[in-house]
Image (cartoon, rainbow, N blue to C red):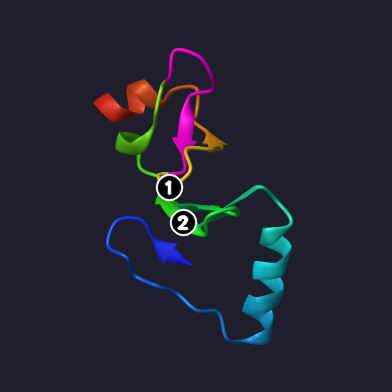
Amino acid sequence: MTCETDGLQMFVRYETGIKRLEDMTKAKASPLGNFVVCQECDVAVKRSLKKIHDPIFGKTGWYCTECGKFLLEAPEDWERQLKD
């Protein structure tokens, strides 16, 4: 996996982690702590309120910075959380 912010690459080497990674790849996008991973691009997008996109057409949430695909829906109160 490659971090979209700084290019950090992460490698999974142990059996437990490999199994979790295999399970995550079955989904279109997988939450991984504070990140969402695009399964098509292997790009990790930070789940920061500042990175939420609110397009005119489409869902509000996090999108892949590489291919633009929708990854994860934003919480309903994200705008209030952003102001706090």
> Residue 37: image x %, image y %?
52, 54
Q: Are marks 1 and 2 in contact (CB under 8 Å)?
A: yes
How packed mark 2 is, by other alpha carbons closer than 10 Å (few <14, some 14-19, many 20 or more), is many
Q: Residue 30, percent across and down?
A: 60, 52
In terms of image quadrants, where is residue 54? top left
User: Left or right: 74 with respect to 21?
Assistant: left
Residue 34 visible here: no
- Residue 69, compared with residue 20, is above or below; it is above
**Is label 2 in a helix, a strand or a loop?**
strand
Mark 1 lies on a secondary structure that is: loop
Q: Is residue 21 left or right of residue 44?
A: right
The answer to whether residue 12 is above or below residue 71 is below
Task: Please name the amino acid that badge 1 sits on.
Answer: Glu
In the rendered structure, which disc, 1 or 2, sits on the residue that comes first in sequence?
Answer: 2
Residue 31 visible from this viewpoint:
yes
On the image, numbered disc 1 is attached to which residue? 66
Reply yes or no: does residue 57 show up in magenta.
yes
Q: Which residue is mark 2?
A: 43
Instruction: Give the magenta-colored segment's residue range.
Output: 55-64
Q: Quadrant of the C terminus?
A: top left
**Horizontal side of residue 81 vs 27, given as left or right:** left
Q: Residue at x 34, y 21 (%)?
A: 80
Residue at left offset 50%, top offset 29%: 75
* Image x and y of residue 65, in percent: 40, 44
Residue located 67% across and 60% down the image: 24
Residue found farthest to the top = 56
Report whether 5 appears left or right of 77. Answer: left
The residue under label 2 is which amino acid type?
Answer: Val
